[in-house]
Amino acid sequence: MKKKMVTLMLTVCCSMGLLLTGCGSSDNTSSSADTSSDTTATEEDTTDVAAAEEEGEELQKIALLTAMGGSESWQNRIELATTLDEEYGFEVTNIDCDGNVTTQAQQIESCMESGYDAIIISPADVSAIITTVEKATEAGVPVVSTEGVFEGASACVTIPEYDSAYYMGTQAAEWLNENWPDKTELNVMDMNYEFLENCIERNTGFMDGLKDNCNATINVVSDVSPTTTVEAESMAESALQADSIDVCMSTNGDFLYGFVLACENLGVDLDTVAGFIMDATASSLQYLKEGKVIKGICAWSTPQGQVEYWLEATQYVLSDEYDASEGCKEYDLDYLYITDENVDQAMIDFGVTE
């Protein structure tokens, strides 16, 4: 599946249309020319909702089930989902399981019993919820996945995990080759999500891209899988005390934030370490702007772009156009690369600054 990469001009990605694609489709292109159609669609949606409310029609109840709702990146998305929801005719309620897969399965059951019209879910563990998801869809409660295709899901937002991560690893290697040309070996701390299958693929691409393209020999001296910024900070402190670390590769912005905090706690010269991450957060963008440790960020759309995909997919599976026999409907995200050259625009597009 070939994916088209979006780089440098983040305003392009921020205006991308919500392109419906069938399973196995690919090669989406975003362009600023889509802005007018997006605005029109939003105005029509808002008009439809207002008309429905005047006629006494209730908003459809949607449950947003998250696995890491307390993280910085998810707090942003949750706020957007519960702010933009009425434009799509929804009332979105967030329910977080704090990474507990048993709890999340029970939450799906509870949503069915409580009369939710649909579920948007970020799985804590795909294998642990498939049976319950299938039960929900069979009962007429469609499930939209925010983390790619899995059995039972009615629709999904797919992230080109390996391809985007490999690109990020390649960009990291190019930065290291250019800025640290004399280093023949580099000690790397690998922070990843080993408890999420899609993120294992992401991390594999991340490290493959780095190792395949970096001139220096890569020594992974620490391989950890934190679940919070606090855990990442603690693990990073232990790693930094045990070994001299040159590079931190993280599949999550919250984790690399923990690494930076650990460096500051231990008095590490921040000019001697470089960090590269997947997924932009407010803190990681700020650190990139300040030139503090973080040298590059790869993200998928903007937070609002992602949330709009979720809501668009949910709107579709609740419409008369939806045909369950066609299987999971995919909405493909493009990916973009953020550097010090375009971070100011990124901070606007990601809602960090105005």
Image: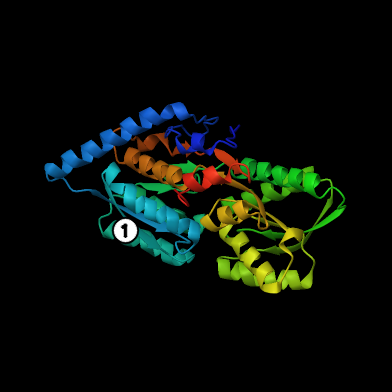
Residue 238 picture location, percent across and down: 71, 73
54 with respect to 303 (left or right): left
Residue at x 62% of width, y 69% of height: 233
- Does 23 appear above or below 248? above
Residue bearing the label numbered 1: 111
Q: Is residue 229 visible?
A: yes
Q: Are there few (<14), some (14-19), or many (20+) residues within 10 Å of tag 1?
A: many
Q: Which residue type carries mark 1?
A: Cys
**Residue sitting nearer the eye, 272 or 228:** 272
Residue 305 picture location, percent across and down: 44, 42
Residue at x 38% of width, y 48% of height: 143
User: Where, by quadrant of the figure, is residue 111 drawn?
Assistant: bottom left
Quadrant of the frame with the N terminus: top right
Residue 280 picture location, percent across and down: 55, 51
**Residue sitting nearer the eye, 131 or 320:** 320
Residue at x 25% of width, y 55% of height: 115
- Callout 1: helix, strand or loop? helix
